[in-house]
Amino acid sequence: MVMRYSPVELMIVCAARVLEDGKTVAVGTGVPCAAAMLAQLTHAPNLVIFFEAGGVAPRLPTMPISVGDSRTMHQALMTTSMAEVMQFCQKGLMDYTFLSGAQIDPYGNLNSTMIGIDYAKPKVRLPGSGGANDLASFCWRANVIMRHDAKKFVEKLDFITSPGYLTGPGAREAAGLPTGSGPYRVITELGVLGFHPDSKRMMPVSLHPGKTLLEMQAATGFKLEEAVDLGRTDEPTDEELRLLRERIDPLGYILRRGG
């Protein structure tokens, strides 16, 4: 069966649907930016987008290629600094963000620092935190977008770069992080996952068309919590796909390379 959309298009659409009108979101480039733009063009016209390099509420003409691209400041409400954007997060003004990593554990903790057991001599040295730790710590709802693979979804991280629910219920608060903040959704090519309200461990929320719970569990290196109310992901609409291909990413920075 030939799908009329790609896995990355479906992930972008799912990410966009998470965002609410009138809320704030801190994004980088790539899939998160495309999701925020799509949300603005559909159900969330008053979504306020923040870029790490300092662009606040720009009118994005097309997809920027970096957080410092001049398009991230086009007709912006404010052009400021990375430090001030992070201060907005610390002040509790950032509703959403999007993150990723090389590894994620059952509690939504992320590793983007290293693979291996020796920090000085890792098997793989990764890019590091950038602003991800700050965003994961202080944004109210952190969403993760990544490929679903048992080597990425692991029981124990090689290194904790960005905090999820740390070791479980109450751990974020004990570490001094804002009460009520934490990871919200994990969006993959298989489905959308959330976190159990009691255990704070990852659980399925919806399965993408044609995907099964068995497939999702097989691609996960730990036992998923039983879903509270497992649904099916709605397919992208024709209008969502048109906006992605013609308005948001007409040159295919993301769509043609798959993410």
Image (cartoon, rainbow, N blue to C red):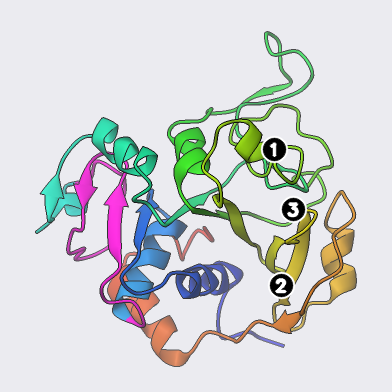
Mark 2 vs mark 3, foreground winner is 3
**Highlighted magenta segment, given as a residue range:** 42-69
Query: How many neighbours does mark 1 have within 10 angstroms: few (below 14), some (14-19), or many (20 or more)?
Result: some
Judging by the rendered image, the residue that carries numbered circle 2 is: 205
The three-letter amino acid code for the residue at tag 1 is Ala
222 relative position to 251: left or right: right
Q: Relative to 103, is 94 above or below?
A: below
Residue 31 rendering spot, x and y as whole percentages: 46, 59
Q: Residue furthest bottom?
A: 238
The residue at the point 39 percent across, 89 percent down is 239
Find the distance from the CA under tag 2 to the CA under tag 1.
23 Å
Quarter residue 25 falls in: bottom left
Residue kind at label 2, given as amino acid type: Val
User: Could you tell me residue 230's position as x and y percent?
Assistant: 77, 79
> Residue 62 colored magenta?
yes
User: What is the x, y in percent for residue 185?
Assistant: 61, 61
Give the secondary structure at mark 1: helix
Q: Residues within 10 Å of mark 3 (few under 14, many from 20)?
A: many
Residue corresponding to mark 3: 200
